[in-house]
Image (cartoon, grey):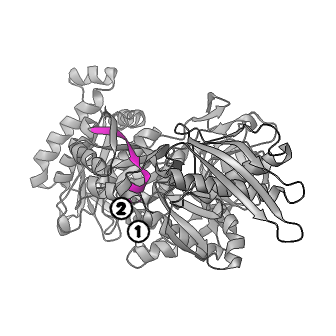
Amino acid sequence: MDQAPSPRVRTVALLGASGAGKTTLTEALLHRAGAIPRAGRVEDGTTVSDHEPEEIARGISLGLGVAPFRWRADDGHTYDVTVLDTPGYLDFAGAVDAALSAADLAVIVVSAVDGVQAGTHLAWRAAADAGVPRVLVVTKEDRARADFHRVLDELRDAFGDAVVPLELPFGDEAAFTGVADVLSEEAYGYEPDGRHHTEPLPAALAEEEHRLHEQVTEEIVAHDDEQLERYLAGEVPSVAELERTLAHEVAAGEAVPVLVASGTTGVGVDRLADLVCELCPAPGTRTVLAGDVEVQVAPDPAGPVLLHAFRTTADPFVGQVTLFRVLSGTVRAGDRLVNTTTRTEERLPGLFLLRGKEHTPVDVAVAGQVAAVAKLTGTPAGSLLAAKGAPGASMTARPPRARPGVYGLVLEPVTQSDDDRLSAALGRLAAEDPTLTVERTGDRTVLRGLGDTHLTVALERLARVFGVHVTTSPVPVGYRETVARAVEAEGKVKKQSGGHGQYAVVQLRVSPLPAGAGFEFVDSVVGGAIPRSYLPAVERGVREAMAAGGPHGYPVVDVRVEVYDGKAHSVDSSDMAFRTAAATGLREALAAAGTVVLEPVCRVQVTVPTSVQGDVMSDLSTRRGRITDTVSLEGGEVVVEATVPESELRRYVLDLRSLTGGRGDLTVAPDHYAPCPEHLTTV
């Protein structure tokens, strides 16, 4: 595939709710551009984007699909377009973040049947947070119960006056056969092969189309003082002038055009490709960091080479595949570059364009383009690659949006072979998807992600791609214990029945410390009752007993242990004897004084629509949560902050989605420990 010059490169992220039709639209674009001989079907598992077994089995996108094609637009120019097809399911939002980090334009797909959904709102907010211009496309207009005008009203209600319809459909449902261009006031009917022809505007649509044309024209010229002055003087702007002004408004986020298309019948698909190429901003400057200072990198093909590796995938045949966008310069197969974060030197063995699972070799990639390379083992997603010694070698990428794991499972390898390979395999999974995190506590391995489906798919890939099989269990709550009151206790070890024996006596005072103070060991022994050489063994024995757990079986914390007296034998005493005596003494003290079970309490931040604020706050209260703050945001949302016991949050992310219709955004972080109510204490 030959490359077009850099100004004719376009990278487009398809976003939207699950089931809105993103993958079907991608297939239609590829087929209409001649990149594939026939469009695949999601139901048959034959699409370019959804080629992984896990995606085919579920019939939804789970990862980032890449679909490049070449398109000759109405303006006479040829464009290299890369479509990044993203999942709509909430668990895979990391792929959306990766796509937006590389995209020039976000095309938000909305179903004409289902209308504005939770995923639509989330896609809109993700693009806005990333600073990526947006276009809305209403799909499935050919389906039963499709209603473009209802969806347009929903879009305007949800996203305001920036929503500008550029097309109207000829009919709904099975009668959808063409589109009317609002700017040119022309009508386009469609052939079965997806090509359009000009035809008279249907009489039933003429009045609405003309009224909409005047409204849209006024909205466009209102953002250009010179054009507005001429318009008020009676001069009607040409279609080309309106499109140029609209393109600037789209790039600035002042206007969000609405288009209509059917990925199934092909109606409107070529118009979508044309308008995306003409309205989509050309590759622009990208912001990177030089230390703490933001630096703008211009997409100059003659500039120093700087690549942004925005996504990695594990391919069972070629190993790790890294998707990258060229921020500056021209990169060639065989080049050697340096990872600006890890300082690892990488050789690019061969460049290729990735279309689904198909690799198309290319010799070079220039600024603005998206390409791929295999076997960059030292370059995780989010890295920059630069020529050694070049200015970019001291720069790093802006960190991606933090999406901490809110749902976890404990992993237990099935066999010893699985255990040996588990760590490396999880490392590669986490490199492929930064929203997966791996925690290791003692001999326990915990995998955390954004939801139950997220982890299920990750474990399926763990088995299929890496051959590592595990069983899972819920993550246990990290309860602790502390002593209830001050108490004195004695620990003894006496074994003197012939030969070398064991002898040690320790007198301990055990008392509680303030929350979070940890452990304090105090030596108050006088007169050599316990030789100084044995005191480290006493402390070690106490620590081991605390870690082994108190009467309830949980590790002991926030305790002051004072050793004030004891006895030793000149022959039979030893480090082991004093370790054992100290552990026994602590256990006796805990049994005598009793313990208080402490439960971990988390700091929870929930962003939800104000319409469900009361329901969310009430639900948090039933989970023994304490509301600490609420903050109203623009766009009808509110942030609710609370402290909630960890035991009440095991499946909270799933319950929150149900409660908010999928529009709840959750972050959870450890905060402190607090006494657990007695009726919840497990003995």
Residue 275 visible in rendering: no
Q: Earlier in the sequence, mark 1 or mark 2?
A: 2
Asked where in the image residue 393 lies, by quadrant, the reply is: top right
> Quarter of the image containing the C terminus?
bottom left
Q: Is the magenta stretch mostly helix, strand or loop?
A: strand
Where are the magenta residues, as a range?
637-651
Q: Do the residues labelled 1 and 2 touch (CB within 8 Å)?
A: yes
**Residue 504: x and y, percent?**
77, 56
Q: Could you tell me how far apart the alpha carbons at marks 1 and 2 are, in whole angstroms?
A: 7 Å
Relative placement, left or right, of 311 versus 646 is right
User: Which residue, given by chain and number where applicable, does mark 2 sit on?
Assistant: 18
**Residue 68: x and y, percent?**
53, 59
**10 Å neighbourhood of mark 1: few (<14), some, or many (≥20)?**
some
Closer to us: 40 or 194: 40
User: Helix, strand or loop at disc 2?
Assistant: loop
Query: Which kind of residue does numbered mark 1 sit on?
Result: Ile
Residue 124 visible in rendering: yes
User: Helix, strand or loop at disc 1?
Assistant: loop
Residue found 73% across the figure and 48% down from its top: 539
